[in-house]
Image: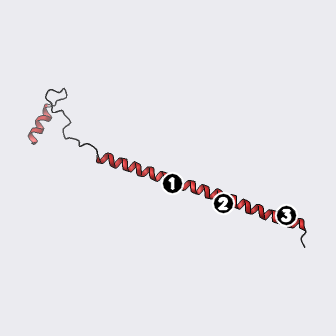
Amino acid sequence: MASSGVNVLRYSALGLGVVYGFYHQRQIYSSDRAAAAQREYEHKQQLITQAKKAYAAKNKPAVSSSSASQDINSSSFDLESFIAQLDKA
């Protein structure tokens, strides 16, 4: 038969194992939950970035075929492009 000292040692080891298992499981669960929250945050950031790009593309002002000024008195007036535009019309 086992003595009472050996039984105390066995039950103490069992209790410590249960406590360690509980602690370790909480650590694993906590790190998994933090990783899931980080993945969700990154996914939301990606969606926001895509939405900003789509919004910018949708609301981008139309680029005219002629970048020259149509104002004859302007310093950036280009006569050749003005005449070419008149020929197109």
Give the residue number, with chain letter if any, for mark 1: 39
Identify the residue shown where x is 32% and y is 45%: 56
The reply to whether the C-beta atoms of the residues labelled 2 and 1 are less than 8 Å apart is no
Q: Is residue 44 above or below residue 68?
A: below
Identify the residue shown where x is 77% and y is 60%: 16
| Mark seen at residue 82 | none
Q: Is residue 67 above or below residue 48?
A: above
Residue 31 point in image, percent of width and height:
60, 55
Residue 76 point in image, percent of width and height:
19, 28
Q: Amino acid at mark 1?
A: Arg
Give the residue number, with chain letter if any, for mark 2: 25
Q: Earlier in the sequence, mark 2 or mark 3?
A: 3
Q: Earlier in the sequence, mark 3 or mark 1?
A: 3
Measured in 3D between alpha carbons, the distance from the residue under mark 3 to the one under mark 1, in whole angstroms, is 45 Å
Q: Amino acid at mark 2?
A: Gln
Could you tell me which secondary element the residue under label 2 belongs to? helix
Q: Amino acid at mark 3?
A: Leu
Residue 23 point in image, percent of width and height:
69, 58
Could you tell me which secondary element the residue under label 3 belongs to? helix
Q: Residue furthest bottom?
A: 1
Give the residue number, with chain letter if any, for mark 3: 9
Measured in 3D between alpha carbons, the distance from the residue under mark 2 to the one under mark 1, in whole angstroms, is 21 Å
For the C terminus, the image quarter is top left
Q: Quadrant of residue 32?
A: bottom right
Measured in 3D between alpha carbons, the distance from the residue under mark 2 to the one under mark 3, in whole angstroms, is 24 Å
Q: Is residue 73 left or right of residue 37?
A: left
Q: Is residue 65 above or below residue 50?
A: above
Q: Is residue 74 left or right of residue 52?
A: left
Q: Earlier in the sequence, mark 2 or mark 1?
A: 2
